[in-house]
Image (cartoon, coloured by chain):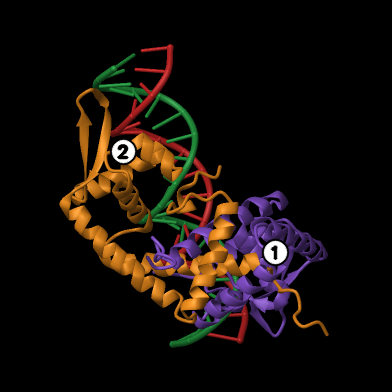
Chain colours: A purple, B orange, C red, D green
DNA sequence: TATTGTTATACTCTATAACTATA
DNA sequence: TATAGTTATAGAGTATAACAATA
């Protein structure tokens, strides 16, 4: 008998299973801040490239511009981001974090670290580092943009 | 400078990112067989426990019974599964694979292996085994049912 | 009265297409 | 005529609740 049988459903199934679980757990946890995962991703994107146009953000996240409008609407109504018109090209809406948005981003970071610890509770520091290495290798090979969740991608 | 900085977004983010990508890639691939991921999961569940009632399947997958009705409907119309009434308790509908369903399951296995290879192309055999180990450890700790995708779970 | 399965309905999320304003 | 953003509309997927059949 070989030392270990081939996995019943494949490693990628395990990856999907655990990844989906992690996504659901994060959604629940970030819900405590009254945020959805897409909103959180947008806040992060704006923080990483302040003043981007909505077109640029849509391009970065890989989502239709129309979806971005609704997302920005929600965050703007809550005072987390603001649209600023560009005087030299009044078609553009530059999106910026407000002070409140910046403050919330710190809370998001804290929640994300708690989430990280909870999901990876079974692994020690070395194992987490090893997992991160392996996943980073796969992510790079698969052409994933660092920090951008593929849930925005238009698949049709 | 320390040997490695803490990850910018956390390892669990990477897990979610890669896991979501894997799920999307699988959805696309299994679409070639005119199946959705939920349908695929149900076919596997029926294969693993033939003759289960719809209630039992719903319980196993963690989904409302009403959703199962629609899923079984779709697969039954395509001749992949069949409902058999239990003569001793005519409320129950035992779900079984048809011959066609069994044949399709073999195709699903082939597609799943191709998917596995494509997603994990960046890793050699040892690395894949290590990744599988780490993910299995996390999955067990997080209480995930082996072989059952958490996408069915009712979260509200 | 309890349980299995079904149907009816509504809600959320997202995409496609038409529209407005600026250039 | 082209581009940024918006609004209107429709579709897929899923949940909740009411219902029918059987026990």
Q: Residue at x 32, y 44 (%)?
A: B49
Q: What element does badge 2 sit on?
A: loop
Report which residue position mark 1 lands on: A124
> Considering only vertical position in the picture, is B55 above or below A127?
above
Q: Chain of mark 1?
A: A
Choose between B62 and B132: the one closer to the eye.
B132
Q: Residues within 10 Å of mark 2 (few under 14, many from 20)?
A: some
Where on the picture, by quarter, is residue A8? bottom left
Task: Answer with the quarter of the image where residue A79 lies.
Answer: bottom right
Residue at position x 73%, y 73% from top? A47
On screen, residue B38 above or below A156: above
Percent position of residue A34, x then y = 69, 51
Q: Is residue C22 above or below residue A16?
A: below
Question: Is A95 on the left or on the right of B142, as rendered?
Answer: right
Distance from label 1 to label 2 (Cα)? Answer: 40 Å
Nearer to us: label 1 or label 2: 1
Lateral position of residue B9 relative to residue A102, left or right: left
Confirm whether residue B61 shows in the render: yes
* x then y, percent, for residue A139: 54, 77
Chain hosting mark 2: B
Image point 69% across, 71% down: which residue? A126
The residue where tag 2 is placed is B52
Relative vertical location of residue B33 with respect to residue A136 in this rendering, above or below: above
């Amino acid at each position: 008998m070989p030392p270990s049988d081939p996995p019943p459903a494949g490693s990628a199934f395990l990856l999907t299973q655990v990844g989906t679980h992690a996504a659901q757990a994060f959604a629940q946890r970030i819900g405590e801040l009254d945020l959805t995962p897409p909103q959180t991703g947008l806040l992060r994107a704006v923080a990483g490239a302040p003043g981007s146009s909505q077109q640029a953000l849509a391009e970065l996240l890989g989502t239709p511009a129309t979806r971005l409008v609704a997302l920005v609407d929600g965050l703007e109504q809550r005072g987390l981001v603001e649209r600023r018109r560009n005087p030299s090209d009044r078609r553009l809406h530059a999106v910026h974090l407000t002070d409140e948005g910046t403050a919330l981003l710190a809370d998001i970071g804290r929640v994300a670290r708690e989430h990280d610890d909870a999901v990876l509770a079974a692994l020690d520091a070395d194992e987490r580092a090893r997992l991160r290495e392996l996943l980073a290798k796969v992510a790079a090979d698969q052409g994933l943009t660092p920090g951008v969740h593929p849930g925005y991608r238009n698949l049709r």
